[in-house]
């Protein structure tokens, strides 16, 4: 059995596809230790295209979801955790937490994944903090990248400010 960190490294690798939103997901079939699906955030194209949704949308009803573990670089949001519960995946392993993402200015619905899972009949175990420092660093880099983009080339000298 490979450990959680092995698969989290894979999720981090997939997250490289979108440095501005480094949310990467790997869905592993635990008994065979094989990757059934992977996904990355594509919210530049659709607001619901999160990494978890990207991975889940490639799987069909025949998937043995009850034998799967979902690895994701950040704690699933309510939409994704809801989809995970509907699929029946019993274990989610994540790196960065929702409170961490909020602390660096990332817009997040203020409900923890475990709190949502507790409202469902079948439930879902959540294990956080796996490769947390690596995941946190990736999200910090993404914030800096976005800040640089929003800032643009900076103020131009000699250009007058707004009229007073
Ligand atoms: Zn999500």
Image (spheres, rainbow, N blue to C red):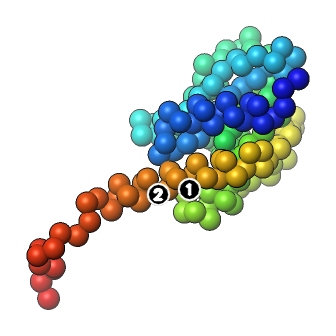
Question: Residue 50 appears in which quarter of the rendering?
Answer: top right
Identity of the residue drawn at 57% across and 36% down: 15
Mark 1 is surrounded, within 10 Å at the Cα level, by few (under 14), some (14 to 19) or many (20 or more) other residues, namely some
Viewed as shown, does residue 31 lie left or right of 142? Answer: right
Q: Nearer the viewer, residue 67 or 143?
A: 143
Residue 144's mark? 2
Residue 140's mark? 1
Identity of the residue drawn at 50% across and 33% down: 17
Quick check: can you spot residue 109?
no
State whether label 1 is within 8 Å of ligand 1: no
Identity of the residue drawn at 69% across and 34% down: 9
Q: Are marks 1 and 2 in contact (CB under 8 Å)?
A: yes
Quadrant of the image where one finds ligand 1: top right
> How far from the left and from the top, in percent, is residue 79?
64, 42
Query: Which SS class for mark 1?
Result: helix
Identity of the residue drawn at 11% across and 74% down: 159
Q: Quadrant of the C terminus?
A: bottom left
Give the vertical position of 4 relative to 144 (above or below).
above
């Amino acid at each position: 059995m490979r450990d959680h960190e092995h698969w989290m490294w894979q999720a981090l690798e997939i997250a490289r596809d979108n440095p501005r939103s480094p949310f990467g997901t790997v869905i592993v079939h635990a008994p065979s230790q094989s990757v059934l699906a992977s996904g990355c955030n594509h919210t530049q194209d659709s607001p619901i295209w999160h990494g978890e949704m990207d991975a889940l949308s490639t799987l069909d009803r025949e998937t043995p979801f009850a034998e799967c573990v979902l690895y994701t670089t950040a704690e699933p949001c309510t939409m994704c955790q809801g989809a995970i519960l509907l699929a029946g995946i019993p274990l989610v392993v994540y790196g960065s937490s929702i409170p961490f993402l909020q602390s660096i200015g990332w817009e997040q619905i203020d409900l923890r994944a475990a709190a949502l899972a507790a409202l469902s009949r079948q439930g879902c175990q959540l294990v956080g903090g796996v490769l947390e420092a690596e995941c946190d660093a990736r999200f910090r880099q993404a914030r800096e990248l976005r800040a640089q983009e929003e800032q643009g080339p900076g103020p131009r000298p000699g250009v007058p400010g707004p009229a007073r």
